[in-house]
Amino acid sequence: MTAVAEPPPWRVLLVDDHPLFREGLAAAVNLDDAFAVVGQAACADGAVAEAVRTGPDLVVMDLGLPGRSGLEATRRILCDHSGTRVLVMTMSEDDDSLLAAVRAGARGYLLKGAGRDEILRALHTVARGGAVFGPQVAERLGALLGASGSASAKEAFPTLTAREREVLDLLAAGLGYRQIAQRLVVTDKTVRNHVGSIFAKLQVHDRAQAIVRARQAGLGGA
């Protein structure tokens, strides 16, 4: 009987400006055979450089970094490495930080008081394509995203035109291109042209990624 090969461990990059915290987190993560810490960074620019060097599957990202923020590092890493997933681990409990992290593309948000088991469960969930938020923030997230109307969408996607935001809103609501064309009384080709522009401006590769970004910004309630 042929043995089933074990999948390689997920490659993890740790980003935090406190060396002792990074070392403790690295030790905890490396105890789980599903993960291998391949790099560490203490600032946003270092995180981007380490992501290029190591090609991580997962990034554990602090928000309060010196110089550029962890949010900017998250956006840059996800722009350059679409297959990478980011789990934010921070001291920030405020709603603005939570929403900003989600909009930047983070797939999870934990506070630094989380225990080792909770951190590893979160890493497993995010690595498998899920999203996870600590109990202190999860109950707030739905309400926060639901309260994000067109004004916050405009803030989240400042490069989109009003018509492009309208098309993105309908995409996020589950409408197909023909349905959107009928709703807006335009041709299918016009809708596809708008969608192509949206993809380019949001730096996404397909409709699914665009919908995720749109729903994170509160669109799709049509």
Image: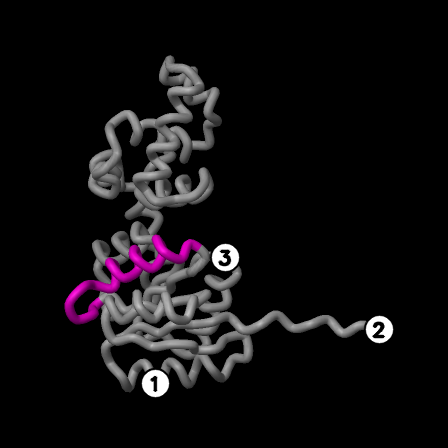
The residue at the far top in this view is 185
Q: Are marks 1 and 3 in contact (CB under 8 Å)?
A: no
165 vs 127, left or right, is: left
Identify which residue is drawn at 38% across, 70% down: 53
Q: Residues within 10 Å of mark 3 (few under 14, many from 20)?
A: few
Q: Are marks 2 and 3 in contact (CB under 8 Å)?
A: no
The amino acid pointed to by label 2 is Met
Residue on which disc 1 sits: 23
Identify which residue is drawn at 35% across, 27% down: 194
The amino acid pointed to by label 1 is Glu
Q: Residues within 10 Å of mark 1 (few under 14, many from 20)?
A: some
Where is residue 198 drawn, in percent x and y? 34, 35
Residue on which disc 2 sits: 1
Where is residue 202 drawn, in percent x and y? 32, 42
The amino acid pointed to by label 3 is Gly
Labels 1 and 2: the sequence-earlier one: 2
In the figure, 133 relative to 15: above or below?
Answer: above
Magenta residues, start to end: 64-82
